[in-house]
Amino acid sequence: MFHFLHRSGDSERSGTTVRHGRLPRLLWGVTLIFSLALVFGVASFPAFAATGAPTLKVVPKNVGIPGDGVNCNGPHSGAFTWFCHVTLTEVKSSSKPLHWFTRSDQPAKFIPANGNLSPGQSVQVMIETNFCGGFTHFYFVGPKNVATVQYQCG
């Protein structure tokens, strides 16, 4: 890959001496570290792992009553309440734990309504709503992003 050859004819003519030593060792050291990181994965090297901002992810991003979407059922309790379930996760590449909370465009109850997550950790959230008049949104707010779920009913 790198050719550090000393040809006596060239150095004698130019009056310089080709030095072997620090630079080639440094290049080999850097090459070795990055090669090992590629082979064993970045997570094996804590200095390279978990460098991203705390980030929330929600699945699924679209929910709705049967016939309009997934992960919701009802109506329940005579008050025409629909129950939806989503999974909220802090992505593994986040650098530190985060605190999250919820908001919505229409009245809704979230269980749990807030909490703390560590990188790679998930929590299932149940959403109760009486709204059934088209589309609305549920928001999961973290320190660096907002994960949004679209809800459809009717």
Image (tube, grey):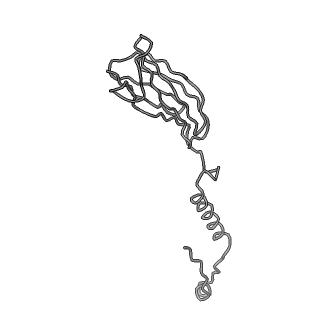
Quarter of the image with the C terminus in it: top left
Residue appearing at x 36%, y 29% in the figure: 69
* Residue 64 left/right relative to 98: left
* Residue 130 % position (x, y): 41, 15
Q: Is residue 98 depicted above or below 36 in this figure?
A: above
Q: Is residue 26 depicted above or below 72 in this figure?
A: below
Residue appearing at x 64%, y 50% in the figure: 47
Residue appearing at x 65%, y 65% in the figure: 29
- Report the label total: 0
Point out the residue furthest to the bottom here.
Answer: 9
* Residue 5 left/right relative to 83: right
Q: Nearer the viewer, residue 141 or 57?
A: 57
Residue appearing at x 63%, y 71% in the figure: 24
* Residue 94 left/right relative to 69: right
Quarter of the image with the N terminus in it: bottom right
* Residue 43 % position (x, y): 61, 50
* Residue 110 % position (x, y): 50, 21
Q: Nearer the viewer, residue 124 or 45?
A: 124
* Residue 38 % position (x, y): 56, 59
Point out the residue furthest to the top here.
Answer: 78
